[in-house]
Amino acid sequence: MRAAAAIGSLAVSVALIVATSACDEGEPESTKTQYGDCDVSGHHGEFHLSPKTAGALTVKTTLPAPGWWNGDTPASVKSGYEYCMAANIAYRSGLDRLKVENAPFPEVVSGRTTNFDLALAQITITPERSKVAAFSPPYLDSTLGVLIRDGEKINENNLRDVRIGVAEGTTGEAFVKNRLKPTKPVTAYANDPEMVTALEKGRIDAVVHDTTILLAYPQKREGRVRIVGQYRTDQGYGALYPKGSPNKSELDHVIKQLIDDGTLAKLSVVYLGAAFGQDPDKIPYFTVKEGS
């Protein structure tokens, strides 16, 4: 998905980072604007945007996305890596609220949605997507994980010969069809829970999707599914902007600042560390076999 090596190493080595609350440098704690359960930092109003809605940062995402957006509806989300990333962007831009809008992932990355300031939905930056939208600098590395039912013997040698499920419109779907080239039909799903349920019920045998998304499922469905491997993609997640957005330069600066001052690394510890439940670096790396 929807996923800068130095940035990714901060995210995946979450056990090495001490979880600390971000503290504001220029505004007393008691006067800070509240964005759900997020801690915000930096200088309020340091950056200047032309938002679609006065006083608000309008953010598109695709729910559910545990760890990234903790809640099933826009109104219920109060925390998560990308939610609190958006909160910090809004705060540093002098916008006192977040306007979260849920949209199907294929619509977000195809340029078919409008009237928003940015989208945060674990979106992998690709040349194809860059033709219809603009992107921020990458803020997190992405790999593609392989999720199977616990007890099954599926590995990099026989993955091509089982029924694979993918998320519709994602880089995982393109990777499976164009690189793995499985011998059985590939099934694309509109949302992640539906796809994982299909795996559990035996309608498919494996899921290939962003590792940082799949890592939440072995914890939630203990004893039923597990991640057996991951593929390197040499790609990263970026914030997506509407093509021609007047805010691109300013938003790029905010996100770069969040990377450089360690804010995103702290969010990774607090939200993704809890969702991962394991060190992604210890998951074996698969390779695409010659002739696949």
Image (spheres, rainbow, N blue to C red):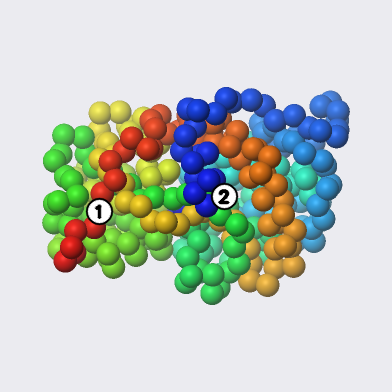
Along the line of sight, the residue nearer the viewer: 41 or 169: 41
Q: Picture coordinates of residue 35 (x, y %)?
A: 71, 37
Quadrant position of residue 246:
bottom right
On the rendered structure, is 19 left or right of 115?
left
> What type is the residue that disc 1 sits on?
Thr
User: Residue visible at 52% across and 52% down?
Assistant: 4
Q: Picture coordinates of residue 201 (x, y %)?
A: 22, 42
Q: Picture coordinates of residue 107 (x, y %)?
A: 51, 65
Along the line of sight, the residue nearer the viewer: 178 or 141: 141
Q: Which residue is mark 1?
A: 287
Q: Picture coordinates of residue 260 (x, y %)?
A: 66, 44
Q: Which residue is mark 2?
A: 139
User: Residue visible at 72% across and 35% down?
Assistant: 40
On the rendered structure, is 237 left or right of 144?
right
Tell me which numbered mark, 2 or 1, is placed earlier along the sequence.
2
On the rendered structure, is 257 left or right of 233?
right
Note whether 18 is above or below 210 in the view shown: above
Label 1: which secondary element:
loop
Quadrant position of residue 97:
top right
Asked whether residue 204 is in view, the answer is yes
Note whether 108 is above or below 255 in the view shown: below
